Amino acid sequence: MSDAMIQADGLVKIYKTKQTEVLALQGLDLTVEEGELTALIGNSGSGKSTFLNMIGGLDRPSAGSLMVCGKNLFKMSEKELVAYKRDTVGFVWQNNGRNLLPYLSVLENIMLPMNLKDTKKKKEKALELLDRVGLSSKKNSRMNMMSGGEQQRVAIAIALANSPKILLADEPTGSVDTKTADMIFDIFTELNREGQTILIVTHDVALSKKVKRVVAIRDGKISSERILKEKYADRLKEITVDWRNEETQEEYVIVDKVGRVQIPREILDHLSLKDNKVKLEFQDGKVVISAPEELKGE
């Protein structure tokens, strides 16, 4: 796709130790278009953070390819990779210790990664970014003078310091209260409205249900996608919507390039299978999955 910002094909990642091998990704395929706000969800160990680290240039696959902004990320030299991490991606971590230096002021933290040579322009841009995250009054504060939510908003400003093409966020609301989580999500949605491509890893159910596109990773592969229902698209700030419990999205199972799907566990449980065989039929325009009569559980 010509407008694809991220194109992952057949990503495999194996972590090896002396005792064992862990298969973190098992042929993951995903396309993210320019200007999308996409959330990645999945259980711990599903591979979502591994995938995010690959896009961030922090990890390499055991097999497969990853194109970001038209460049093959795994054929870059170390020098090219450094430039990529500086100029193409901005990273917001859950652990603020990875984002912020405690001995610098807020303003100094934001200016530090900037590749501008003009100090005056650096300061002007840093102040602009602080205003974007609603913390202009905190420019001279140190980290120990700020709440966890304020620190995370500073981290977003730092991630935007070099105007990255892609903003990556790993559990950005994982250690803040609901009100602060809503504020952080509002920042992301406003950035996205202005064209910023954003990829978020999250366990936050309420946050994920507000995102237009949610990709679920299970056992190292894309298992399903959820798309925000049109009637909820303009209601993101409405307090009358119960984002945790309402069905705000349509869920679609993903068919991979060789025709395989991952059937959700709750559906398989209803089939009462005795082993791993199912019957597949095409009836009246629908694919029907059922347990063969002779193989149903007692």
Image (tube, rainbow, N blue to C red):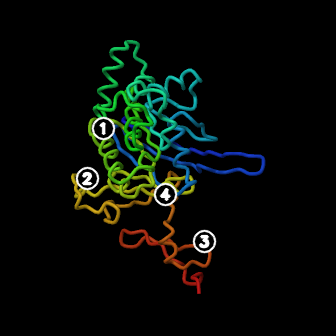
Q: Residue at x 41, y 13 (%)?
A: 117
- Is disc 2 surrounded by few (<14), some (14 to 19) or many (20+) residues within 10 Å? some
Residue that mark 4 sits on: 223
Q: CA distance from mark 4 to mark 1?
A: 28 Å
- Is disc 1 surrounded by few (<14), some (14 to 19) or many (20+) residues within 10 Å? some
Which element is circle 3 on? loop
Residue 236: give its label: 2
Foreground pick, 246 / 174: 174
Q: CA distance from mark 2 to mark 3?
A: 41 Å
Q: Please, is residue 126 above or below residue 99 in the view?
A: above
Residue that mark 3 sits on: 276
| Amino acid type for the residue under numbered disc 2 | Leu
Left or right of 239 in this view: 102: right
Rendered location of residue 67, percent (x, y): 49, 35
User: Which of the two labelled residues, at mark 2 and mark 3, occupies the earlier sequence position?
Assistant: 2
Residue 191: give its label: 1
Please tell me whether mark 3 or mark 4 is closer to you in this view. Answer: 4
